[in-house]
Amino acid sequence: MLNFEKKGNGKETLILLHGFMENLSIWDDMEPHLSENFSLLKIDLPGHGQSEILAETHTMELMAEEVKKVLDHEKLNKVHLLGHSMGGYTSLAFAEKYPENLKSLTLFFSTYFPDDEEKKQQRIKSYRIIKEAFPNYVRAGIPNLFNPNERDILEGKIETALAIALSTNNLGALACVKGMVERTDKKHILENLESKILVLAGKHDNAVKTENTIKSLPDRTNIKSYVIDCGHNGHWEKPGICAEIINTELLHNMPKKLVL
């Protein structure tokens, strides 16, 4: 079973899924800001942190099934599910398979669009360097995921992200890259899911096409979106603001669209 950690004794359970080349420790900065009404369940996705590699290709569906095993083990039924980047892709696969288990779905600097052909080819070309020169791959990519206008302020956070990424098993990372290439369009999930849907996006996100993601959201009363003045990593760049939105939206109600 996947490695996980539990924190808090709140009445509402919030499942936190990290992104590519991350692990459950990425939530440390946000955790103090999250409401005491939440019980947090932080999970290491397959091939990341202390969770084992499960297959040559970690599809989002496979990872969603493994998340469900953790929920079953903990006897959790109705939960709030939040996923960062690849964790968001996994969350969408979970919502497709197990919609009855969700109180809410939060895409945290993630998207429901599949990779376009250019992005797929970039990922495929990365297979060899991930296998043979993983540290180079990490150091070339991680800094670009942060707001370029605040690179100096965020230097410590970038170093943290680099350390976590470098600690990731390169073959685990490779299995997930292969899985991300296979992703399909999940907009129909947002069109049909009855649970609350929350989308947090970064104005300076180089990994996700924020404008397209927000603009193409279905016009439904259960969907709310926020664009935040940061890059791809709101949990490190704007942890207090992100947590405040999550607390308010998942536990209360706010206006439909805001730019922060």
Image (cartoon, rainbow, N blue to C red):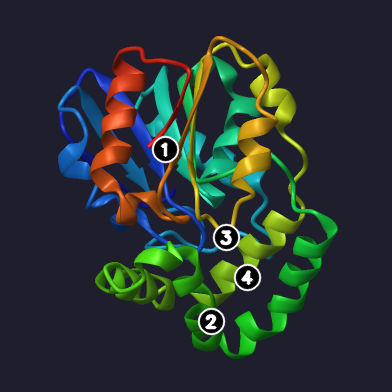
Using the image, determine if residue 24 lies above or below residue 34.
below
The amino acid marked with disc number 4 is Leu
**Left or right: 64, with 248 as reference point:** right
The amino acid marked with disc number 3 is Asn
Marks 2 and 4, how far apart in space? 16 Å
Numbered badge on residue 140: 2
Residue occupying the point 81% across, 68% down: 121
The residue pinned by badge 1 equals 70
The label nearer to you, 2 versus 3, is: 3
The amino acid marked with disc number 2 is Ala
The residue pinned by badge 3 equals 206
Q: Earlier in the sequence, mark 1 or mark 4?
A: 1
- Along the viewing direction, whichever of 53 and 253 lies nearer the viewer: 253
| Tags 2 and 3 touching, CB below 8 Å | no
Q: Badge 1: how crowded within 10 Å, few (<14), some, or many (20+)?
A: some
The amino acid marked with disc number 1 is Val
Marks 1 and 3, how far apart in space? 32 Å
Using the image, determine if residue 154 lies above or below residue 134.
above
